[in-house]
Structure formats: C-alpha cells, structure tokens
Amino acid sequence: MDQTKINELRSEGKKLFERYGAGDDWPPAVVERLKAINDELGAACKAGEAADSARRFRNLENGMDTPAGQMRHPSAGGGGGGAYSGKTLGDAFVASKAFRDFDGHSSPVAEIETKTVLDTLTWAPESIRLSRIEPYPVAALGIADLFAQGETSQATVPFMEEVTFTNNAAEQVEGEAKGEAALAFEEKSSMVRTIAVFLPVSRQLMDDVSAARSYVGSRLALMVRSRLDSELLNGDGVAPNLLGLLNTPNVQNQVKGADPVPDALLKALTLVEVNAGYACDGVCLNPADWRDLRLLRTADGQYIFGHPSAVTPPQVWGLPVATSARLAEGTGLVGSFKGAAQLFYRSAMEIAVSDSHSDYWIRNKLCVRAELRVALACFRPAAFATVTGL
C-alpha cells in the first residue's frame, strides 16, 4: 500500500473519531467503516509502513494520543507516553470495550475512565431570565372612577352650595297672595392637595434595562392612585389631606340593625333620594361585605344574587358595586357619586426623573417621582349615606 493511500485512511479515521469520538452514539455504519480502516492499516503495518504511519499519527492536530472519545491510545501507554507499539488508530478502536460490545446492530456504548468530572456544578449552564415581573399584590382600584372628573387651574375649587330650599308652590285662589319660595346659598371650597411618591434608581439600571423605565413609572403611579382612593374615602381634611366622604359633615347614615343587608342598603338609597333629591348611582363595599352579600341564599339553598357560574357584573338594587379594601369592613357607602361630587385635577399624573436630589448627581443615581394634584368637591353631602353594622 502506497503512502498516499495510508494518508487517506488516516485522514478518514481522524475525521470519524472527531465526529463520533464521544463513544456513546456510534452508528453501526461508522463502526463497520472503522473496522475496515483498521484492517487496511493493519495490512500496511505488516508491509513495513507502520512506523511511518505511527509518527504521522502522533503529530496530528489536537493530540491524537488521547482521541476525542477519551479512549487511551496505545502510544500513551500506562506511563508517560512511551514508544509507539506499532498498532494503528483502528487497533485502538478495536481494542476498546465499545467495539467488543458491538453486536452488529445496536450502537456501541463506551465505558470511559474518568478522574475529574466537569459538570454543571463547576460550569453552570447559561439561563436567560424571563422578562416577566411578578408585581407585589395590591388592592384593586376603583373609587376615583366613581366620581365625575374635571380640571381646574386654581389652587382652590370654590363653589356655592344651596343650603335653603323652601318650596311654597301651591294652587292659587283668585285674588289671594302667591306662596313665597326661599333659597339661600353658602360658599364652600375644596383645597387642591398633592399626592406624591419617589423612588431612588441607579442611572445604569434605567439606561441598561429598558423594561425598568416603564415598570418603575407604572408602579409609582399605582401607589399614588391607591393613596388617592384611600383619601377619597378616609381623608380627614386636615392639611395636606383631602376631606374624604366618610368624614364630610352632613353625610347621612343608615344603621343596619336587624335588617338583612339588602334591606339596609335600600333604606340608605331611600334616604338619599328623599332628603337630597338625588338618585344614587353607585354602592361601595368592603370585599368581605360584598362576599357575604353574594353568598346570601334562600331557605332551599338558591343563591339570591345569582348562581356562582353566572357571569354577571356586581350590582345590588340595579346599581353597580365597587369593592375596596380601603373601606372599613362592616361599613358601606351609597350615593350620587357623579351627580353630587366631582374630582378636579390641577395636574394629572406626572412621572418625572431628576438627578438633582441630594448627592445623586455624583453617585449616578436618579430620583423618579410620581405625583398628581387634585381636589374633591362634594356639592351635596346629603346625597351620600353610610350603612353601618353590616
């Protein structure tokens, strides 16, 4: 066999070992071909060409003394890589347990001698974090949406409240004096209040993580709206607080007493209509109170407010129900939210970023601020009624 043929066989064997050298997935055809290469190279060795072939194999790229499959090459020996034994690359393959276990059908599996295992504990696989951010749970919003919305360019929203309404309209007897009506007004005002919050953020985060900019802004805005909802109900009116409906003078009250909850709510609705002349357009309840109301059943077990599988909007006595954990459990609120009150925004929700706070400029920190300025004007307090003892 000439040298050219030996080189071709050697090159082919090298390529097969580079591709299938791991020893755990050798196709039968590859095994057969390596066996053929072994036979041909063996014949060449017997013809006196083995020595030259051995020298060339030792100089192959990537060090063929230890093939890719980690099977020990004959020249590696049991010591430090002694003299070449005259065996070919095919001989090394045939000597392996993988070849000896090969039955001509299934792929051989090599048993590899290992000293140190490189695993995922020393080299962790790369993992790409999901872009999803799981927000911290907060109570649902909705109270501000019940009110009529407006704008103002002033720091105070003044308005006139009709405090006297005397109706002396009557049938007229010819020649008699007509009944005299009486109207009186009182000027009221609602101060614009500022609700704000800020968050320190590194400039690098805002520059490098695009999702952080929108996320931070939306969460800060949520915090402000959440506080606004609380103020609209519970604000005590002492600066800088808004005056919430529950602390507004002349808001009516209906005690539940022994009445079922639906009865107590209807009585409160009636108070508003009779004493204020307004039709209610909403009911606000704590989620726990709405749950108890929703679970009311007849004596035979039928749900009064509809079957659990029914998809119906929350409502009672034909009015929408807004639930809010900011309303104390056991207290409900009914009223003409859009007819007898209004929110006036001096400035809508604003998200601003600055590095001028404290020493933020030299520390590459940013101050992200969310704020709004708003006033709540309650034109007719009697158009609202609380229901206590639920």
Image (cartoon, rainbow, N blue to C red):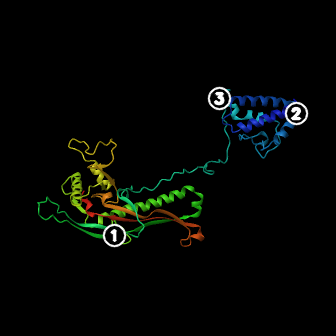
Q: Position of residue 368 (x, y in %)?
A: 51, 64
Q: Quadrant of residue 172?
A: bottom left
Give the residue displayed 82% in from the left and 42% down from the top.
58
Q: At label 3, which amino acid type do we have? A: Ser
- Work out whether 263 lies above or below 108: below
- Going from N to C along the chain, the mark reached first, 2 or 1, is 2
Furthest toward the front, the residue is: 175
- Which residue corresponds to mark 2? 3
- Residue 363's quadrant in the figure? bottom right
Given this view, does label 3 or label 1 mark the residue nearer the observer? 1
Q: From what the image shows, is residue 34 above or below residue 178? A: above
Residue that badge 1 annotates? 189
Left of 82 or right of it: where is 384? left
The residue where tag 3 is placed is 106
210 relative to 231 in the view: left or right:
right
Indicate the secondary structure of the residue bearing disc 2: helix
Q: Could you tell which of marks 3 and 1 lies nearer the N-terminus?
A: 3
From the image, which quarter does the C terminus lie in? Answer: bottom left
Mark 3–mark 2 Cα distance, whole angstroms, equals 35 Å
Q: Which quadrant of the rendered structure holds the N terminus?
A: top right
Question: Is residue 384 visible in the rendered structure shown here?
Answer: no
Q: Nearer the viewer, residue 29 or 114?
A: 29
Where is residue 247? Give x, y as percent. 29, 66
Q: What is the secondary structure assignment of the residue under circle 1?
A: strand
